[in-house]
Amino acid sequence: MNLLQKLRARWKLVLGLAVLGFIASVTLVIGGAAGLAFTSTEEFCINCHEMKNNVYAEYKGTIHDQNRTGVRAICTDCHVPRQPVGLILRKIQATGDLYHHFITGSINTREKFEAKRYELATHVWKRMKETDSIECRNCHNADKMSTDLQTPRAQTRHAKAKAENLTCIDCHFGIAHQEPDGPGPQELFPKASKTE
């Protein structure tokens, strides 16, 4: 085999590997996007009885499920950031839920779930404090809210929250699920600052 044939063979190998690498990369990207989309559906979130019979049952009929405008928030709207890095990090963190579901069974009955409710809620509150409730602000933009349409009480409370640098979860932590017994996010995480 002469030098030219060896170079051609080497380039064919390099080109073949590059094409295979490209196909594998595209497959992984499309598969990853499909996986993220699938795990962000309401059907996926409530496919285990722990979620369907507990927090989803509580959510049914709330303002986030049914309201006069017909706008409906599903699990991921409140519990998963929309921003790419935050979304992927949250999905990785959520694999811990699989551990509790499949391995420990620590919330597989109503009684076990209720025993862990406060602990589970504090994890969500802490995360939302750290992100300045970005999941809420994806839909609710304070700059676009009309104070004229708010009750006087809501106007006063929103002004106070803004003055005290509070975030949505400080006050609205029982809006879609039963509020657990114990201190709320404002008392638990008073020094968590807003991220801008």
Image (cartoon, rainbow, N blue to C red):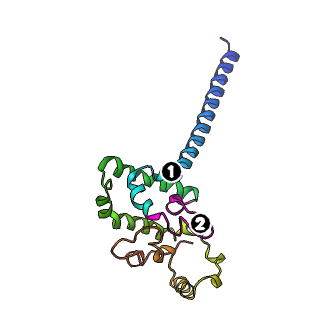
Depth-wise, is mark 2 or mark 1 nearer the camera?
Answer: 1
| Residue 188: % across, % down | 37, 75
Q: Which residue is mark 1?
A: 43
| Image vertical order of residue 140 relative to residue 166, above or below | above
Query: In the structure shown, which secondary structural element does the residue marked by tag 2 occupy?
Result: loop
Q: Earlier in the sequence, mark 2 or mark 1?
A: 1
Tell me the quarter of the image containing the N terminus.
top right
Q: Nearer the viewer, residue 71 or 185?
A: 71
Q: Which residue is mark 2?
A: 138
Q: Nearer the viewer, residue 58 or 157?
A: 58
| Residue 166: % across, % down | 50, 79
| Residue 32: % across, % down | 55, 44
Question: Magenta segment range?
Answer: 58-81
| Residue 43: % across, % down | 50, 50
Circle 1: residue type: Glu
The residue located at (62%, 73%) in the rendering is 141
Q: Which quarter of the picture shows residue 127?
A: bottom left
| Image vertical order of residue 182 relative to residue 119, above or below | below
**Is residue 78 on the magenta stretch?**
yes
